[in-house]
Image (cartoon, grey):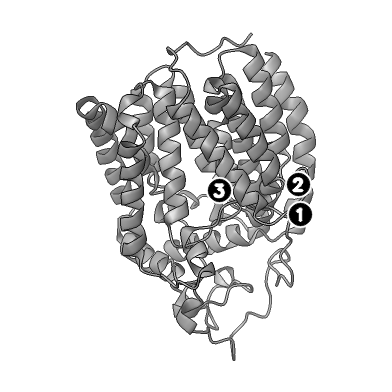
Amino acid sequence: MWLVFVLLVVFIPQVFIAHRLMEESMMQDLHSRVIGTHLMQANRPAYFYEWKKGDDVKLFDPNIILPYGLNGVTASPFILWLQLPLVKFSYCNIKLFWWVIEELLMFATLLLTWFIPTKRSKQLITIFLSTVFFCYSRNWWQHIYSGQYYILFGFLFALSAFLSQKRKEATLLVFPLAALVRPFFALAVLPWIFKDFKSSLKWVLISGVFAIFLLFISDTMRYMPEYSKAMKLYGTEITGWNNREPNKLNRAEPITMENCVVKMDVVRNFGAGCLFSVQHYFQLFGLKVTNATFFSGTLVLFVVFFLWVTGFKNISANSETLMLASFMIYIFCELFTPANRNPYNMVQYLGILGLVINRATGLSLCLLLLGLALNHDLPFRFSYQREIGEMLILVSIYLVLFLSKERKMQPIVSIS
């Protein structure tokens, strides 16, 4: 029970800080998703919508004016469907509910990742790093302030890692279902199939068929073409929306809105950050690439390079190794997609922190610590520091995968 006690000691003050941030913010990203769910409920396009006089005031966003008729909704159709129970309430109440959900997901992710290390010393290291660099991180404060949902993906990785230590097939069931909320999970299952094709494919197909069934019964399959079209258009944002400006003149606005739905003159910056997308770095060199097929092809080549050239076929097929390989492919997907998610990606690393520490050697552990410190501007701020920090974390995971001694799987540590 000592881990639960430590979690409560860590968690309670964190909740008070996050609650203050929740009260001062409109949670803009949450508001966009809620509007998408309202549109879905009204049987309207969920990703392309412009408010007109006479429309429901709940569909109006005072802070989003985009070209191409886009409305700022970027979550998958299944996420919008999962939010249906929330949209029965006012947005002011939804903000409170979502904040509680975020905190509970953080609570659960911390607990799961603390349970994974098999030695007391590594549990203590995991507690320290997860508390300082995640629970009280500027990345997490930005996540709360924006009303984001990346902690859900971190939780899914933590849950998969925890379950896979008991039964490897659990991850093969979780990942295809997780792809409903984050399509990148579909590629994250590749290391498992690569290592044990026949056995793994069976479980992936079972879960995949069930996932497709959920798409049909939720009636979200019909939104997939619209979702795909919207994501391709968002992929042009970094390069200047193809020089097309939204029409800001004569925009209709409702007379009254909820108290917590306001125009935001300044979006608070917590100094959070990590690696931007590959497209962003192309842009820095004057290369305006917006073709989604190009980035998809580049991602496939990079994943093949990762799985074959780096010697993945020569490492052991235990669940810890495969989980870390899955996470790296997932992060590659985030980085090669032509749209920035900086700084929210860093929140997701919490889900595999316990795995990395459990298998880390001295070198990989030092690189992990250094990467986390640099990502948080320690010991001092310099250019590209946060990006370098995330790259060092990825190098640390790589060392755990390919250069550390292979260990036999041990049962999950008993908590008493």
Instruction: Tell me, yes or no, if residue 7 can be seen here.
Output: yes
Query: Residue at horizontal 53%, vertical 77%?
Result: 66
**Which residue is label 3 attached to?**
345
First in sequence, mark 3 or 1: give its number: 1
**Tag 3, which secondary structure?**
helix
Mark 2 or mark 3: name the one nearer the start of the chain: 2
Judged from the image, the secondary structure of the residue bearing numbered disc 2 is: helix
Instruction: Give the percent coordinates (x, y) of residue 124.
Output: 68, 19
State which quarter of the image contains the N terminus: top right
Image: 401 above or below 235 = above
| Residue 368, numbered circle | none
Q: Nearer the viewer, mark 3 or mark 1?
A: 3
Q: Looking at this rendering, what residue extends furthest in the left direction?
A: 198
Is 96 situated above or below 406? below
Q: Which mark is residue 23?
A: 1
Residue at image position (66%, 32%) is 130
Q: Position of residue 102 (x, y in %)?
A: 62, 43
